Image (cartoon, rainbow, N blue to C red):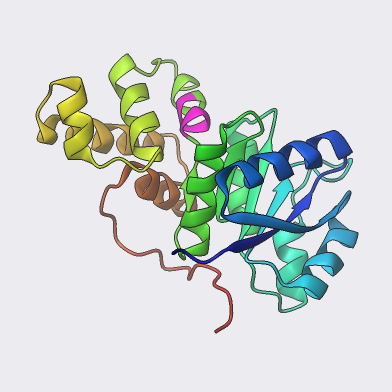
Amino acid sequence: MRAQLTAVVIDEHEITRRALRSRCAAQGRVDVIGESDHAEHGSYVVERLVPTVVIADLVLDPAGTFQLPRLLLARHIHVPVIAFSGLVTRSHVRAAFMAGARGVVAKDAPPSVLMRAIEAVVGGTAFVDPEIAILMLDTTGVPSTPLQRDVLTATASGRDHRSVAIDLQMRECEISACADLILERISALGAPPEIQYALAVTLQVARPVMTQPLVKRPA
């Protein structure tokens, strides 16, 4: 039986915090043990409760910055952070990862995607919501293809290239080539290594380990 995970949720809107609590409960593996409505107070809640993961709104202050990971690290609190938002742009995603977030998820993401993000960051890697990756691709002027969207969605749900190929009646090498092309397009956008790494994990494509160590919970 897999271990139960704990989370602290930080968002200014109570209705959003309630919805996140419900999504976590729906997966049966994540217990929300605390919450807050802004970053500064939230960092103290995290320090006191030491959850497995923190799920925080990408925009927690009027300046539109994402300072929570830095606040936690300043207090030597090594808990992975997932940023989520209803309005996600390329600059939002970049800001979240550059601030130290290990995952980015859309607020309307289904519980299964949120769970995959939690498992990824708790496991020491990273995650990008497939819908966010699709939005990033579509801002390049060359829209994402149906195959690229299918591959992103399927791999983000945890399915390997072989099973995706069987469902789509394609060869495994074609699915892998599609995943590689998605990464090449994101790289061409000038995305920092943190985003490229997170997307590679989501797409299940082998990539060199990041030079910047991922934040892990203390033993």
Relative horizontal placement of residue 136, taking residue 14 as reference (left or right):
left
Residue 207 at x, y = what percent? 29, 55
Residue at figure coordinates x 49%, y 55% from the top left? 119
Residue 105 at x, y = what percent? 59, 39
Which quadrant, please, contains the N terminus? bottom left
Q: Nearer the viewer, residue 138 or 171?
A: 171
Q: Is residue 13 visible from the viewing direction of this image?
A: no
Magenta segment, principal secondary structure? helix
Residue 215 at x, y = what percent? 55, 69
Residue at figure coordinates x 44%, y 34% from the top left? 189
Residue at figure coordinates x 12%, y 24% from the top left? 170
Q: Nearer the viewer, residue 29 or 106?
A: 29
**Magenta span includes 190:** no
Stretch in magenta: 130-134
Residue at figure coordinates x 38%, y 35% from the top left? 188
Q: Nearer the viewer, residue 95 or 165?
A: 165
